Image (tube, rainbow, N blue to C red):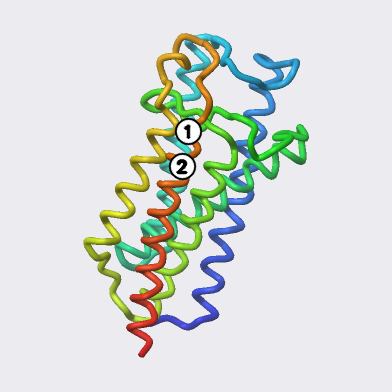
């Protein structure tokens, strides 16, 4: 176990890093949109140069590496490292949109569409989707960190694994289900919100299972 104050300080430093890193990411997007979407971002996507595309792909890999490094550096156990990565990712993603809203007054609504990721194919969807996923990542990561820091080794049950995998696959499908239109720079079909809600229900079930484990261990 570690002292509660040290645990809080660790989470605060991870949060501060993620907020600052989110500004760096948002500033890059500000410049890209000035180049390719001077009239304002909207689908369908526009073709970008192969050079800029290569840089963007490398930037996404570097982003994941940096967020993962935070978890590796501050976590003491495997699941603490994973959980701090989840917290860092969730805070980074939420504040990425907060910074864009502050700088560009975009998105105008959480239902505005965005390019979410590019590897291995473009992921697109409404802003509300990554925001909800990020919230779940923060909550789930915090739950596991608290368990581990109380000296309780976290071992996800088969149910937690099943719900997490099914939920992740459902949400990923919602981002890439019309990838053909995206790659051909056409307007995508309407976003499949029922698939998103299915994924979120699975995530909430997994979170409930983890919280139940915490209550059981506390007894």
Left of 70 or right of it: where is 37? right
Callout 1: SS: loop
In this view, the residue farthest toward the front is: 194
User: Label 2 crowding class (10 Å Cα cut-off): few <14, some 14-19, many 20+?
Assistant: many
State whether residue 202 is above or below residue 7. above
Left or right of 41? Residue 177 is left
Residue at the far bottom: name it: 219
Residue at image point 37% right, 65% down:
80
Q: Residue at x 51, y 77 (%)?
A: 6
Density class for disc 1 (Cα within 10 Å; few <14, some 14-19, many ≥20) is: some
The disc label shown at residue 192, or none = 1
Residue 99: quadrant of the picture: top right
Question: Which quadrant of the view contains residue 155?
Answer: bottom left
Disc 2 target residue = 196
Residue 130 rendering spot, x and y as whole percentages: 53, 42
Q: Which mark is residue 48?
A: none
Farthest-out residue, left = 158
Apparent side of residue 183 relative to residue 206 in the rendered image (left or right) = right
Q: Say which element carries label 2.
A: helix
């Amino acid at each position: 176990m570690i002292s509660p104050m040290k645990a809080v300080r660790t989470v605060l430093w991870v949060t501060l890093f993620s907020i600052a890193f989110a500004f760096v990411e948002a500033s890059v997007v500000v410049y890209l949109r000035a180049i390719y979407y001077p009239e304002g971002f909207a689908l369908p996507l526009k073709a970008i140069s192969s050079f800029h595309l290569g840089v963007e792909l490398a930037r996404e890999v570097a982003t994941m590496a940096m967020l993962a490094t935070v978890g590796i550096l501050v976590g003491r156990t495997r699941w603490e490292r994973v959980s701090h990565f989840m917290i860092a990712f969730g805070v980074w993603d939420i504040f990425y949109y907060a910074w864009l809203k502050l700088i560009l007054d975009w998105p105008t609504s959480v239902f505005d569409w965005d390019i979410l990721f590019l590897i291995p194919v473009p992921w697109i969807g409404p802003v509300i989707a990554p925001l909800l996923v990020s919230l779940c990542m923060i909550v789930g990561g915090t739950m596991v960190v608290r368990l581990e820091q109380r000296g309780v080794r976290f071992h996800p049950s088969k149910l937690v694994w099943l719900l997490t995998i099914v939920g992740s696959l459902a949400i990923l499908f919602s981002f890439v289900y019309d990838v053909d239109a995206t790659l051909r720079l056409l307007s995508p079909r309407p976003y499949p919100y029922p698939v998103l809600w299915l994924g979120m229900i699975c995530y909430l079930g997994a979170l409930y299972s983890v919280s139940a484990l915490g209550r059981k261990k506390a007894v």
